[in-house]
Image: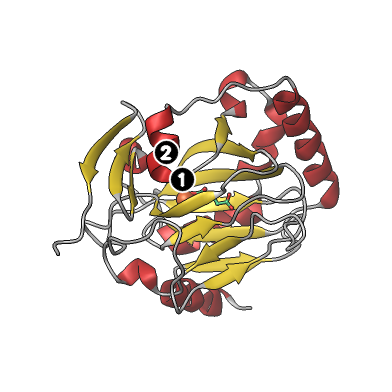
């Protein structure tokens, strides 16, 4: 795919999947680090209100804040940075790296937008890295609604209901998923094994660092820094 084709597709769909983007050796190394980190029986960091309302079972880890240098190999990858610049333009910045762990048997993640689509030009770009295969046996597939980054707020409704136009993605080990922060997305329940994904969030020049502090779910807006539901969303009926 040429740079123009990649950009057109990202602009049309609000996401772009590139298989075999990362070397298997690096994926193995990061996968090992995550498994040993979460092996020590992690505590759940979100409060139970979040768990209950968001129907989201994820334990985050920010390895770069703990100086785990192996994770720098992804955000120092020249090809990833060139691709990020194609989408975000000059002066873009890297926000943080977050590993997400979901235990076998948990709910996955309800539909959401990573940031509010209040203005079309203010958004984050997720750069998701999969260090092991996501398959139908294991579950944890990521579901997106193509083009929804241009459709404003995700409608109020069933947090885990289906959209007619949804597309189910099953990223393999080494896949890069670029996902616009306004795109409607969710993660299906985790059945066969523990699930890991790693997100290197980024944003265009001039975007506030707090861009991903408030996510929009179909039943609420949730602020992570204060662990608060800041708006309950209800249908007007
Ligand atoms: O883990 C995934 O595949 C997607 C997670 C997600 O929703 C996100 O990183 O914003
Ligand atoms: Fe998300």
Seen in the picture, residue 60 relative to 175 is either above or below; the reply is above
Left or right: 137, with 54 as reference point: right
Quarter in which the C terminus is drawn: bottom left
Residue reaching furthest to the left: 236
- Mark 1 secondary-structure assignment: loop
Left or right: 63, with 37 as reference point: left
Classify mark 2 as within 8 Å of ligand 1 or not, answering yes or no: no
Q: Identify the mark at residue 55; answer none if there is no mark.
A: 1
Residue at the location (37% across, 60% down)? 158
Left or right: 160, with 221 as reference point: right
Q: How many dots with numbers?
A: 2
Q: Identify the mark at residue 103; answer none if there is no mark.
A: none
Quarter in which the N terminus is drawn: bottom right
At which x and y percent is residue 233?
23, 51
Seen in the picture, residue 167 relative to 191 is either above or below; the reply is below
- Mark 2 secondary-structure assignment: helix
Residue at the location (54% across, 80% down)? 5
Residue at the location (72% across, 42% down)? 194
At which x and y percent is residue 93?
43, 44
Circles 1 and 2: CB atoms closer than 8 Å: yes
Q: Which residue is mark 2?
A: 52
Task: Please tell me how crowded label 2 is: few (under 14), some (14-19), or many (20+) other residues with Cα within 10 Å.
Answer: few
Residue at the location (42% across, 58% down)? 88
> In the depicted view, which residue is nearer to us: 194 or 78?
194
At which x and y percent is residue 3?
55, 73
């Amino acid at each position: 795919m040429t740079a123009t084709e990649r950009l057109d597709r990202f602009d049309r769909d609000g996401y772009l999947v590139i298989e075999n983007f990362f070397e298997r050796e690096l994926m193995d190394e990061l996968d090992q680090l995550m498994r040993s980190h979460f092996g020590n029986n992690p505590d759940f960091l979100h409060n139970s209100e979040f768990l209950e309302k968001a129907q989201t079972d994820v334990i985050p880890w920010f390895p770069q804040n703990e100086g785990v240098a192996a994770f720098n190999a992804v955000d120092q990858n020249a090809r990833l940075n060139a691709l990020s610049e194609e989408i975000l333009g000059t002066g873009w910045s890297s926000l943080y790296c977050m590993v997400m762990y979901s235990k076998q048997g948990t709910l996955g993640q309800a539909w959401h937008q990573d940031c509010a689509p209040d203005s079309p030009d203010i958004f984050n770009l997720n750069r998701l890295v999969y260090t092991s295969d996501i398959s139908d046996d294991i579950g944890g597939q990521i579901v997106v609604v193509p083009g929804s980054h241009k459709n404003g707020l995700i409608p109020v409704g069933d947090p885990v209901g289906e959209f007619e136009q949804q597309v189910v993605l099953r990223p393999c080990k080494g896949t890069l998923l670029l996902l616009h922060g306004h795109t409607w997305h969710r993660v299906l329940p985790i059945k066969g094994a523990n699930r890991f994904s790693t997100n290197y969030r980024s944003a265009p020049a001039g975007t506030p660092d707090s861009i991903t502090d408030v996510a929009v779910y179909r039943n609420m807006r949730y602020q992570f820094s204060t662990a608060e539901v800041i708006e309950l969303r209800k249908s007007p009926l």
